[in-house]
């Protein structure tokens, strides 16, 4: 890669000349001599092979090319400053990145609200978000490649902080044969029908959570695909209410009238890597995830309030 000929200090000098309206004013703000400022700008123009400023009266005015380059340089200088700040925060123990793995059934609206509140406090820390299904969350946590994990069941050997539960309801298209029976349904009724099951993303010990042992089963890779299949009349499934609320309201999906088990409410838990203490950024993110998890789900779509 070709090394830049113009330094960040030179771009900062040019910005000061333009922002302050002249060489003398820039020299005062930067605590340098006027001759040093003039030399720096002249050297820049020589290195770039084009004029950046012209003098009108006693004021330095940008050329057309200088205006374009100056606008681009402001972002460059800002990013360099942010990079230096990040290096300082990392030296103080602030993480460059927090890794979060989440069961796909957990309401994304709550995560969005927590991450939105985290942004102004992040100090440049990135969040790497990964979605898994069922035991996939456990595997990622035990492999030590995530800092935080949100799972829909208890993981042996880990102490998880209790979070809210997520309601799963058994649904099918209104014209599905199960609804045409027009009566309360039993386990035996379901056994003869096609069930749509979401594939466990875990590789070591995948689970068939929710499968009833029906003779016919379609396994799909995501909850969204399952909802599409069921909404098209292709089988029945237990799906998170928060994901299909609109389809339920529009009559595209209808709860199955089961005599028992029509609704399930698994408890979710927040885990951390037990072999590594959480850094300050991860601690803040944990507090925000827990705060917005406790809020009503419809509040997750409201604009977040600034931290106190």
Image (cartoon, rainbow, N blue to C red):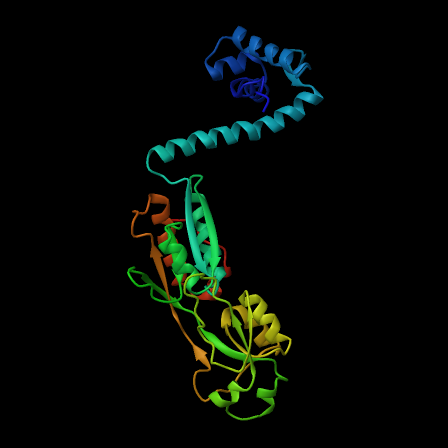
Rendering coords of residue 217 (x, y %) = 55, 77
* Figure check: 85 above or below 186: above
* Figure check: 56 above or below 187: above
**Nearest the camera: 174 or 151?**
151
* Figure check: 71 above or below 134: above
In the picture, the quarter occupied by the N terminus is top right
Is there any visible trace of residue 306 in the rendered image? Answer: no
Is there any visible trace of residue 112 in the rendered image? Answer: yes
Dividing the picture into quadrants, the one containing residue 149 is: bottom left
Q: Residue at x 59, y 78 (%)?
A: 253
Dividing the picture into quadrants, the one containing residue 252 is: bottom right
Rendering coords of residue 82 (x, y %) = 47, 32
Residue at the extreme front: 204
Dividing the picture into quadrants, the one containing residue 69 is: top right
**Nearest the camera: 195 or 101?**
195
Horizontal arrangement in the rendering, residue 307 relative to residue 1 (left or right): left
* Figure check: 280 above or below 292: above
Rendering coords of residue 159 (x, y %) = 28, 60
Q: Residue at x 44, y 50 (%)?
A: 117
Q: Residue at x 50, y 92 (%)?
A: 184
């Amino acid at each position: 890669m070709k090394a830049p000929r113009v330094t960040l200090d030179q771009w900062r000098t040019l910005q000061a000349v333009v922002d302050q309206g002249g060489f003398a004013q820039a020299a005062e703000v930067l605590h340098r001599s006027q001759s040093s400022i003039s030399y720096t700008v002249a050297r820049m123009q020589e290195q770039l092979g084009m004029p950046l400023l012209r003098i009108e009266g006693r004021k330095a005015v940008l050329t057309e090319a200088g205006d374009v380059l100056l606008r681009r340089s402001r972002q460059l200088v800002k990013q360099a400053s942010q990079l230096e700040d990040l290096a300082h925060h990392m030296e103080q123990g602030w993480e460059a990145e927090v890794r979060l793995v989440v069961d796909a059934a957990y309401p994304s609206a709550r995560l969005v609200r927590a991450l939105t509140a985290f942004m102004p406090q992040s100090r440049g820390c990135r969040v790497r978000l990964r979605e898994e299904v069922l035991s996939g969350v456990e595997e990622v946590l035990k492999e030590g490649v995530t800092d935080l994990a949100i799972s829909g069941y208890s993981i042996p050997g880990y102490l998880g902080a209790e979070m809210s539960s997520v309601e799963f309801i058994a649904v099918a298209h209104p014209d599905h044969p199960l609804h045409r029976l027009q009566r309360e349904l039993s386990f035996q009724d379901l056994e003869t029908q096609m069930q749509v099951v979401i594939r466990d993303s875990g590789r070591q010990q995948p689970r068939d959570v929710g499968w009833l042992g029906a003779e016919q089963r379609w396994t799909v890779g995501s909850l969204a695909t399952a909802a599409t299949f069921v909404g098209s009349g292709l089988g029945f499934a237990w799906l998170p209410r928060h994901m299909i609320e609109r389809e339920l309201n529009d009559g595209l999906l209808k709860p199955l009238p089961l005599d028992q088990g029509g609704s399930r409410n698994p408890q979710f838990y927040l885990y951390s890597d037990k072999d590594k203490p959480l850094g300050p950024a991860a601690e803040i993110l944990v507090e925000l995830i827990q705060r917005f998890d406790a809020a009503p789900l419809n509040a997750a779509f409201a604009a977040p309030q600034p931290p106190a």
